[in-house]
Image (spheres, helix red, strand yellow):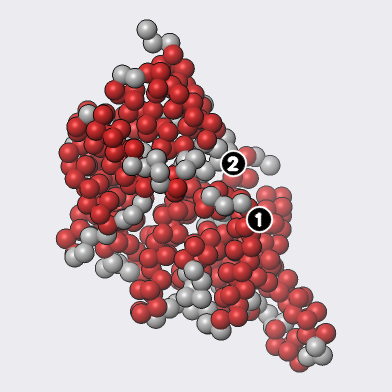
Amino acid sequence: MSQAIHDATEHLIRELAPQVLGSVIRRYRDFPAAEDAVQEALIAASIEWPRDGLPVNPRGWLIQVASRRMIDQLRSDIARRNRETAVAAETEQVAMPAYGDAACQDDTLILLFMCCHPALSQSSAIALTLRAVGGLTTAEIASAFLVPEATMAQRISRAKQSIGTSGVPFGLPTDLERAERLRAVLHVLYLIFNEGYTSSGGSQLQRTDLSTEAIRLTRALHQLLARDPEVAGLLALMLLTDARRDARSGPAGELIPLPQQDRGKWNRAQIAEGIALVSQALPQGAVGPYQLQAAIAAVHDEAARADDTDWPQILALYSVLERLSDNPLITLNRAIAVAMVHGPDAGLKLLHALDSDERLAGNHRLDATRAHLLEMAGDHPAAIEHYRTAAARTTNLAERNYLITQAARLRELP
């Protein structure tokens, strides 16, 4: 089996997984059991499809295999309760809808909103969606939340049980319910994209499958909510950021920072689409954090060279964004913009306020940013120390190698 066939199969399985899970949950209304059944179907597909070739209808094949597993479980449960008549109803032939039809997208979106269920806390909703829709492992989600894997496994399990006992039907929420859940849905998609754009761990800088899936789901959400400016803003942010993907790493997978990237490798079609989206969204009314982040990304992408970047405009946008969102990473990024406009000492002064923020305790980004600003200020010994500290704290090998290289480069300077 060629690597290309294997990769194509894995990509298709990842794309179909949330669609199939949504369909099986809708049919059997048992989240935990449906997830187990779908996982078995996905494993079977990963073995059989590369060997035997793709079925005519891959989505229908997965639904049918998962449904057989559900039916077997129902038979066992029903037999214990002596309810043979229900078995006949459950074992009717499973329909195999055409792959790519409207129901595919509907099931994915329904699953997305269902994971952001009113019975769940926002953190549990995000964790469950990352697991069920985004395809992240429990370990990856735990890393994103900075909690032990066992804690995250319990959180996801409780979330599925809460949905099962809530009695809320599987279907698209009403307009009111959708508005209440939308913030969590957008945050989930944002986290999936970020995990794909810069992996929280492992040897690869990026996980393109996750960032591509996040863009696909956000695009589908934008089609459903075309007039919502924050949905458009998030899609724009993803496109404008993902447009730099091919320039972010070198031949050996090494990280290439934004100022050093070959901008001829940036995806101009994605940049044009992202700029059009955010330009249409900003005048529509209340400006939200995703629109502002997209506007910042657009300023970076519009600069022909790193030296042409409009840092005063970026600083102004970050200042507005910081007032809207209590997120220390925004302050961290604003410190870089402050340094580019007012000098590194001003940026370093802003970082001092983050030293006591527990949300950044042990986060490599604070040390990496401080190292960069110290280097700008000419304090190379201190910059080397913080580059090394940041390297020790990141679990992404490409980031670690970059930070170690930065420290080594400064050591060799006269």
Q: From the viewer's perspective, tell me whether residue 321 is left or right of residue 396.
A: left
Residue that label 1 marks: 150
How far is disc 1 from disc 2 in space, using C-alphas?
35 Å
- Residue at image position (73%, 89%) is 86
Please identify the quadrant where the C terminus is shown: top left
Residue in the image at 47% along x and 17% along y: 408
Q: Position of residue 98 (x, y in %)?
A: 54, 69
Residue 86 vertical position relative to residue 39 in the rendered view, above or below: below
Residue labelled with disc 2: 4
Q: Furthest residue to the top?
A: 414
200 left or right of 320 in image? right
Q: Which mark is residue 345?
A: none
- What secondary structure is found at the residue carrying circle 1? helix
User: In this rendering, is residue 128 above or below 171?
Assistant: above
Tell me: 155 left or right of 314.
right
Residue 20, image quadrant: bottom right
**Residue flagged by tag 1: what amino acid is it?**
Ala
Residue 251 is at least partly visible in this image: no
Under mark 2, the amino acid is Ala
